[in-house]
Image: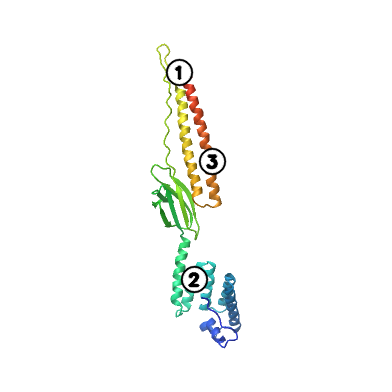
Amino acid sequence: MMIRPPRATSPLLLALVLTLTGTTAVAANAAARTEARRAFERGTRLYDEARYAEAATAFEQAYRRVPNGVVLYNLGQCYEKLGELDKALTSYREYLRLVPKAKDREGVQNRITNLETRLEAARRPRVTVDSEPSGAQVLLDGQARGQTPWSEPVEVGAHELELTLPDHLSLKRGLEVRAGEPIQLRLVLAPTPVMAAAPVPDIVPVVTEEAPSRGRTWTWVAAGATGAATVGAVLLGSIARADARELTTRPHDGADVRRLRDSAQGKSRAANILYGVAGVAAATSVTLFFIEGSF
């Protein structure tokens, strides 16, 4: 509640001046007292009009003319409305210091406690991480912090988040924690791809004493390339699907949307290319099988 001055025509005008000037009333310059009173009244009017920044400026002017605890209380009100919690706390604490017997001391102290809690929450927003599947180990900046679902206050700034789970690919991502902005993440972990076995030819060549086999080195090279390309395609496809699911499971800012979309599209294209390479390598291995077997 804003502490207000009486009207200029009120017989209590002298009491207002004494309130504004405290024990320094006798020594204060009359012009300074007048300017302080006008600034105080202007600040009260601006506060009523919800012009809190201008009201704070007026109260600051009044305090500079004649330092007074009442003005500090009203400054704290303005700063709180403006979301400047540090300044509001300073004003309320100084108010209680200058007016140790204030009747509203308990209420102001409760307000200070509430602001301290809000300020701490702004400085260390809560980060919540869930995963699919759950139970993944959470590492923040390389330090183990628990398992998903996980939630803790985190210092403002840039961090690196990593999730690990047996039989799944580890997931790393940058984390930008901003003051007063809690973060909720749901991340999808891709399973570790199963290595594909090299295809076995359906036809077994017959080796004769007159025409001993010279081996099928290039056939197996092509078969190995088929397996490697298949494994790479499966791996990239899994990562692309994981990026796509993450993009659709929670809101992202513009930069994250572009990054996830480009990552998913790029890995999907690469996976398709590798599937094509695997197909060509498989056809080549079959052809080489018959060619090398004829020598």
Residue picked out by circle 1:
293
| Mark 1 or mark 2: whose residue is earlier in sequence | 2
Residue type (three-letter) at the residue carrying disc 2: Thr
Furthest toward the top, the residue is: 210
Figure colour scheme: rainbow
Q: Is residue 245 visible?
A: yes
What x and y, as percent, mark residue 292? Answer: 47, 19
Q: Marks 1/2: CA distance?
A: 89 Å
Instruction: Answer above or below: position of 179 versus 113.
Output: above
Residue type (three-letter) at the residue carrying disc 3: Gly
Residue at (51, 48) in percent of width and height: 248
Label 1 or label 2, whichever lies nearer to me, is 1
Residue at (45, 68) in percent of width and height: 114
In-image side of 20 versus 111 (left or right): right
| Mark 3 or mark 2: whose residue is earlier in sequence | 2
Residue picked out by circle 2:
90
What x and y, as percent, mark residue 214? Answer: 44, 17
| Mark 3 or mark 1: whose residue is earlier in sequence | 3
Crowd band around label 1 with a 10 angstrom C-alpha radius: few (<14), some (14–19), many (20+): some
Q: Marks 3/2: CA distance?
A: 53 Å
Crowd band around label 3 with a 10 angstrom C-alpha radius: few (<14), some (14–19), many (20+): few
Q: Secondary structure at mark 3?
A: helix
Residue type (three-letter) at the residue carrying disc 1: Gly
Furthest toward the bottom, the residue is: 11
Residue picked out by circle 3:
266
Q: Secondary structure at mark 2?
A: helix
In-image side of 232 versus 39 (left or right): left
Instruction: Answer above or below: position of 122 versus 35.
Output: above
